[in-house]
Amino acid sequence: MSRFLQMTVGGLLEEMTAAHPDHEALVYSDRDLKYTFAELDRRVTQIAKGLMAIGIQKGDHVGIWATNVPDWIPIDAVEVKIVDVNTGEDLPPHQPGELCSRGYNTMNGYYKMPEETARAIDPGGWLHTGDLAVMIENNYYRITGRLKDMVIRGGENIYPKEVEDFLLGVTEIRNVQIVGVPNDMYGEEVAAFVQLHPGANLEPSEIPDYCRGKIARYKIPKHIYFIDDFPMTASGKIQKYKLREMATQLVAEQKEKTLEEDSSVTAN
């Protein structure tokens, strides 16, 4: 037993292949699939060469996406990393950025769309997923949102889910969605669409008051709108782009109203 404790899985496979090359090593009845040790060893070698070809080296961490099928055995794998959304530089754990992946399952590109392909897949073969994520403990990854939903205010990146999770700490709030709206000075400002619990009473001014001193000032919603129901897709997902359009229209209407009032005061 102690001898096996000192062996790697790969070493054990090599030993079994040398001793019993034609014996069955893997049987999967649902596919009528059978691998001998020699066939399994060849399949593992193919995968290993593929990983080496994309730059995997000894000691590298490899994320494994696998289902309960025989393909799990030879370790069909991909690489995963988090990059800075502005510079593209690799980020260490606990820093949010864009999730990128690379591996045998990465597409060659979009059909007859070279510009879109170049934006999605960089020269190193990394697919930029558009997902915002962070590496947490034990090399796990947590998805935190979509890159297209990120708000950029005065050069500061604001992650909507971070603000949404914070505002859900307000007892009266049932749900909240954060979007960015155009702003002449900062590029974008933060807008919040708030859904209250039935019977709850909350004034818009109370939300910034709750935020002050607890989150960065630039993350505090500038525009707050109460909403009964969110626009949804057929599959039940909130349509943030529609909320963004609604907020942009509401801000424009308020700006126009303010200009009219100022003009009226000046005329008088």
Image (cartoon, rainbow, N blue to C red):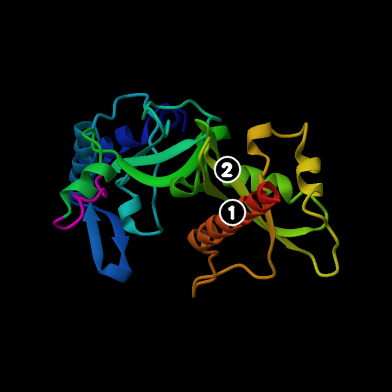
Q: Which residue is mark 2?
A: 189
Establish if 41 lies above or below 217. below
Depth check: 114 or 227 in front?
227
Between 51 and 214, which is closer to the camera in this rendering?
214
Q: Position of residue 257 (x, y in %)?
A: 63, 56
Q: Amino acid at mark 1?
A: Val
Q: In terms of secondary structure, where does tag 2 sit? A: strand
Helix, strand or loop at label 1? It is helix
Q: Quadrant of residue 251?
A: bottom right
Q: Is residue 124 magenta?
A: no
The segment highlighted magenta reads: 103-112
Q: Where does residue 27 sit, x and y in percent of width and height?
A: 30, 61
Residue 85 horizontal/vertical position (percent): 42, 34
Decide which of 5, 75 is in the foreground and name it. Answer: 75
As measured in the structure, the alpha-carbon distance from the residue carrying label 2 to the one carrying label 1 is 10 Å
Tag in front: 2 or 1: 1
Dots 2, 1 in contact, CB < 8 A: yes
Residue visible at 52% across and 34% down?
A: 96
The three-letter code of the residue at mark 2 reads Glu
Q: Pick the residue in front: 17 or 128.
A: 128
Dominant secondary structure of the magenta stretch? Answer: loop
- Residue that extends furthest to the bottom in the rendered view of this protein: 234
- Left or right of residue 222, residue 213 in this image: right
Side of 176 relative to 126 (left or right)? right
Which label sits on residue 49? none
Residue at mark 1: 251
* Label 2: how many Cα within 10 Å (few below 14, some 14–19, many 20+): many
Q: Is residue 167 left or right of residue 161?
A: right
